[in-house]
Image: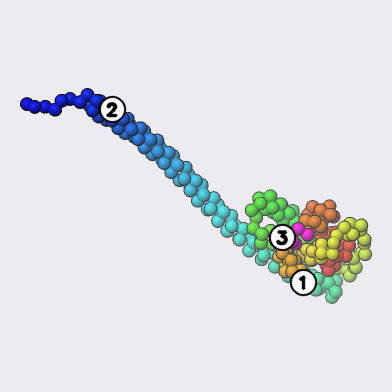
Amino acid sequence: YITKPVDVEEVAARIKTHLQIAHLQRQLAVVNEQLEEKVAARTAELELANASLQAEIKERYQRQRENEQLLTLLQEQNQQLSYFMSWMLQSRPKAQIELTQLFSQQLLDNFAVIGDGLQTAITMLEEQGEADEALLNHLFGVGLRHHQMRLYLDKMAHTGRVAEQGLPDATSPLLDLLTERERDVLTLLCDGLSSNEIAEKLALSDVTVRSHRTSVMRKLKISHIPGLVKFALRHNLTGLD
């Protein structure tokens, strides 16, 4: 037989090429395995993140529902309190509304408990940083109405009946620190208007009203709404008797 002579260099080159291909295949297999591990790990992370997100969404939805239910309940209570307060104020010039000391004290004690609860709720919601603005505004409004009613009942408890009394024409150097707009905001706030209602009445934004409110509290060195109401009453800045 006639055979082709063996080309040593060609055979060596083929062997070398084969070995290189085998090496590349092994490297590719390792890379593929590492990639699969990374994909699996990333998939697990995404699944965990998705589960956490779903839980957070569910929690937020539940909290929103609770806030809506609380807001509805507070609106109903606020309406009842408003009717009660209006009835008492309208009856004042006509009646000799006599309250026994025990009944007066019970009312005052109950209103004190309600006031503490409202202030605690407002503080907790503000500290959360995610409170619903409508709920906060309503809590402020309820707190104002509660404080106004308590001042009225306190007067009744001390006089035994409702008497027509004017507010003292007190003055304070602190008033000079307030701008005209800040006085307007303070007056409306202490008359029971919410931030949204004040913004609408004065043609301002909610942010501007809140900024004025913060500035007033800082200048007067008063850290809570009931304190503002007392200050406004002492200085005849509100229409509440």
Image position of 227 with respect to 236: above or below? above
Mark 2 vs 3, N-terminal side:
2
Q: Could you tell me the amino acid type at mark 1?
A: Trp
What residue is disc 2 on? Answer: 16
Measuring 84% from the left and 52% from the top, which residue is drawn there?
221
SS at mark 2 in the image: helix
Residue density around tag 3, few if under 14, some if 14–19, many if 20 or more, within 10 Å: few
Left or right, 36 with respect to 111, comes to left
Mark 2 vs 1, N-terminal side:
2
Measuring 92% from the left and 57% from the top, which residue is drawn there?
173
Looking at the figure, which quarter contains the N terminus? top left
What residue is disc 3 on? Answer: 207
The residue closer to the viewer here, 130 or 22, is 22
Between circles 2 and 3, the one closer to the viewer is: 2
Cβ atoms at labels 2 and 3 below 8 Å apart: no
Q: Please identify the quarter of the rendering in which residue 208 is found.
A: bottom right
What residue is disc 1 on? Answer: 87
Whole-percent x, y for residue 65 in the image = 58, 58
The CA span between labels 3 and 1 is 34 Å
Give the magenta-colored segment's residue range: 208-212
Cβ atoms at labels 2 and 1 below 8 Å apart: no
The residue closer to the viewer here, 112 or 121, is 121
Mark 3 vs 1, N-terminal side:
1
